[in-house]
Image (cartoon, rainbow, N blue to C red):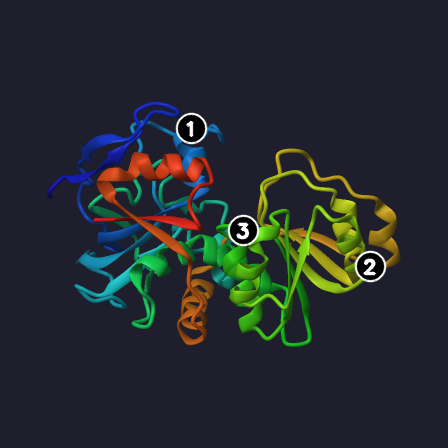
Amino acid sequence: MAQIQGLAAHAAGAELLPFHYDPGKLGAHEVEIAITHCGICHSDLHLIANDWGISQYPFIPGHEIIGTVAALGDEVRQLAPGERVGLGWQSNSCGVCEWCTQGMENLCEQSEGTCVHRNGGYAERVRANARFVVAIPDALKSEQAAPLLCAGITVYNPLRTHSVNPSSRVGVIGIGGLGHIAIQFARAFGAEVTAFSSSADKEEEARALGAHRFVNTRETKAMKEVAGRLDFLLTTVNADQDWSTYLQALRPTGNLCFVGVPPSPVTVPAFPLISGARLISGSPIGSPHRLREMLDVAARHGVKATTELFPMAKANEAIEKVKKSKVRYRAVLAN
């Protein structure tokens, strides 16, 4: 078996350097993907820096992968050589626990990350269990589809799990890599969408993406005006906020759902939760079934990531731009 060439960090926070590894024999249930595109996610940056204490070096990042099927294990029946496919954050699960058997493989305790303790998508090829490799609809361009495999499913999953529909009044906090996709999906579900941002210059873009209303979070008056108006509030930001203010924006039974991770513990007063039966929740990525559903919805409703394309060889340059928040909104590497 030929070695796989990629770009790896050899120590915490180090720049990526050319690296090759022997993937061994292809497993019976595995697929090898020839990578054409791979998105850069903030999770990749955390893994390169070992912020979560789980990285092993040398390590090839990348988990927003689009490519074509290069090889199939003997037991793989659902995919064909040359087929365009995608692979997201998860590459395997046990397949037999209560969560896997209910189609919620993303909650499996033995879940394997595509680039956690294994090599990911900043490379020529990658391998994964075939259950987690999904076909990409023809209507989606590879560059714009790659970020959907992590950022897209991260925002789609909670909207579906919490039954957002045309009667829903949805708020999205933060118009960035996650938020700009969340606005599009919420609009595709027929919901009334309010975008929250501390950047007033993003109003025009938020409305173009599908938001009906824009709230500048730096304006106290604007925040007070949305009190008691929302059913579901999705926070995509990785910064501390006055969460009690957002709690006040919810109607009774409303839900403040976290997909972004603020640095400090989230503290809110208990009384609004009790008096209005309001909820605080969180959501991870979705299952392979939900991933396929999301791609179908994106293809039919024209949902796509706003991207900036870089050659794979310039991955370090792209990572620096992402670190400095100079990419609108997702960086994608191309082989």
Q: Report the amino acid beneath label 2.
A: Ala
Circles 2 and 1 in contact, beta carbons < 8 Å: no
Residue 284 numbered mark, or none: 3
Q: Report the amino acid beneath label 1.
A: Ala
Q: Earlier in the sequence, mark 2 or mark 1?
A: 1
Q: Residue at the spot x=53%, y=60% of the render?
A: 205
Q: Is residue 272 left or right of residue 144?
A: right
Residue 49 numbered mark, or none: 1
Q: Secondary structure at mark 2?
A: loop
The quadrant of the picture occupied by the N terminus is top left
Q: Residue at the spot x=64%, y=47% of the render?
A: 198
Q: Residue at the spot x=19%, y=35% of the render?
A: 21
Percent from the top left, x then y, of residue 174?
A: 59, 50
Percent from the top left, x then y, of residue 281?
A: 67, 52
Res. 308 in view: yes
Which quadrant of the structure image shows residue 307? bottom left
Q: Is residue 130 left or right of residue 289?
A: left
- Closer-to-camera residue (277/175): 175
Furthest residue toward left: 2
For the residues labelled 2 and 1, the Cα–Cα distance comes to 40 Å
Q: Earlier in the sequence, mark 2 or mark 3?
A: 2
Q: Secondary structure at mark 1?
A: helix
Which quadrant of the structure image shows residue 299? bottom left
For the residues labelled 3 and 1, the Cα–Cα distance comes to 21 Å
Q: Is residue 99 above or below residue 40?
A: below
Percent from the top left, x then y, of residue 20?
A: 18, 34
Q: Secondary structure at mark 3?
A: loop
Percent from the top left, x then y, of residue 203?
A: 59, 58
Q: Residue at the spot x=78%, y=63% of the render?
A: 253
Residue with the mark numbered 2: 277
